[in-house]
Amino acid sequence: MDILQTIKLAFRGIIDNKLRSFLTMLGIIIGVTSVIGLVSIGQGTTAKVTEQIQSMGANLLTVNIMGRGANTTLSYEQAMEFLKSPYISGVAPIISDSVTVEHGNENEENVQLQGTNEYLPAVRNYSVSSGRFFISQDVDMRRKVAVLGSGIASNLFGFVDPIGQTVKIKGYNFKVIGVMKSSSSMMGSTDEQVFIPITVAERILQSRGVRTIYIQAAGKEAVSSAKTEISTKLDKIYRVKSEDENYAYRIFDQSEMLDTINETSKTMTMMLGGIAAISLLVGGIGIMNIMLVSVTERTREIGIRKALGARKIDILNQFLIESLVLSGIGGVIGVAVGYLLSWGLGKAFSMSTKTTLPVVLIAFGFSIIVGVFFGIYPANKAGNLKPIDALRYE
Amino acid sequence: MVINLENVYKIYKMGDTAVHALDDVSLKIDEGEFVAIVGPSGSGKSTLMNILGCLDTPTKGKYEFEGRDVSRLNDNELAAIRNRRIGFVFQNFNLLPKLTALENVELPLMYAGKSAAFRRKRAREMLEAVGLGERLHHKPKELSGGQQQRVAIARALAADPPVILGDEPTGNLDTKSGREIMEIMKTLNKNGKTIILITHDLNIAKQAQRNVHIQDGKIVKDEKVVG
């Protein structure tokens, strides 16, 4: 039995019955396309979310202080104590308030003023597009310098370079030393924020309290140790006795969040893929149906072939290969359409899609398995026909 | 001895009644014989042909083909006999309509596991031998009845089987084409092939060396043709 010849014949049979073959393959095409399309969307979303979380800064721990009793905040100095830990490489406490920023006749209301220190860019993975962020001397010397979010900068200064200009906040003049690079992530954007040294913020906001601290662990392995150390310290400050009654502070672990989100989106992707796989199954049933019709239609051909010496296995192979070719072509078209679909969705709805090779291989492989699985029964039926019954069939 | 039937019965159940398509048939055919099995329709001659061709099995009785008891052979061994030991020529040609003449002739060689190059060469030679060297790539429906039957003969000969079984091979042909087919059969017989023809046409039967008359499932007369 010549496999190549059989494949050639199977192709010819498909071309001879173009419409029927196409309709049969359509089930597989839709199945493979939807598996690839939906899983791509799922994976794309996962990748995007992961990227966004990671863009917040590597090994980031966010500490929110609620405090206890009258003691509702932490002082800047207390916060900076954390830097002594060997597991911690950066500490950026935040004192923030909503203020109005003025320049000449222009003013911006409800601007988030963020008093912080020189560690912030490293800890939160921020960078400036022009000028510089403040350095430790700016903080220590209480210099009235400001770094503007890109939105604020363009609103106040238009096309004029803001570096070296002056803005007025709470009646004080600040020299603009830098503009942040435009950014947007799940955790908010810096575009509408203004950064000043925390030591200055303490004075002009008349608030000594730090409510948020961004802490960078010294490495991936240091994250949990850093977390323990922070809790121990904060437990002491706020006299927290046990985990259960800790209302004084919260530590958000970026990698924990990442795990949770990854877990969720993986489940979602699997579910989408599973739903799509059902349509592949339906496509398989379509193949089985048409193969059964084909076996009946070609009973006489089977009889002739058997009279000429075809064995059961030869006939079985012939029909199995036809079913495989049907599902295989369907699979290839499905992969192509699936690629186009996920690319098109990405373009049209600016969705992030990610088509990975394993998904393509799994979807295509599944279509082949469907072809074999649903081809076996009709092929076996054909192979088992008695030559004499098949020859007599009109 | 190529064929040895001993007390063969073929019984079909039709509802409650059992139809004896073959009723205690015994028949021996030697190598190189040219035998016509003659009988009216419904006489059981087609059933006999199917059993001789290993397409069907007897209900009862013994059938030896080339000394092997067919009832003891499995499906694959029967397929091998049909493939290599017997060439079939049918009344309605039984060519595969989607294949070209050449591909039709290649079929038995394909099932015999021959290489593509060999198949092509052999099929071409066979078609040339039956005078269809110019029609290699025609589909059956592009050929006349006589030409189609010649393709079928080329196909029957492709694997070089010692026995040719013809089931009314001239039944669907005009007189002239029928005569041509019979000439080919006679030539094959001269070249050593055992030819067994099934026919209801006494004029065809006359051209064989031996006529076996069958009626109601029984052999009623077995005679040498003289002249």
Image (cartoon, rainbow, N blue to C red):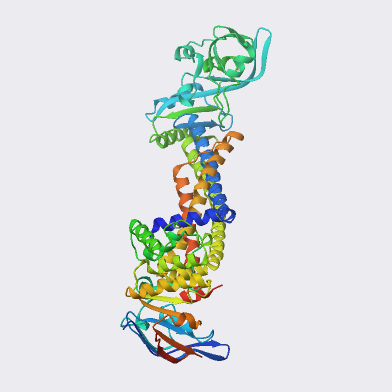
Percent x, y of residue B186? 39, 75
Residue ID at (46%, 69%): A304
Looking at the image, residue A1 sits to the left or right of residue B200; the answer is: left
Is residue A171 found left or right of B204 in the rendered image? right
Residue A290 percent across, percent down from the top left: 56, 61
Q: x, y percentage for residue A186?
A: 56, 32
Residue at image coords 61%, 17%: A152
Compared with residue B50, is residue B84 higher up or lower down, i.e. above or below? above
Figure check: A371 above or below A234? below
Direction front: furthest residue? B227
> In the displayed structure, would residue B148 be above or below residue A19?
below
Q: In which quarter of the image is the N terminus of chain A?
A: bottom left
Q: Nearer the viewer, residue A69 or B153?
A: B153
Q: Nearer the viewer, residue A105 or A31?
A: A31
Q: Say if residue B76 shows up in the picture.
A: no
Residue B103 screen position, x and y as percent: 43, 60
Quadrant assignment for the C terminus of chain A: bottom right
Along the viewing direction, whichever of A58 and A81 lies nearer the viewer: A58
Asked if residue A387 can be seen in this view, the reply is: yes
Q: Residue at x 58, y 32 (%)?
A: A69
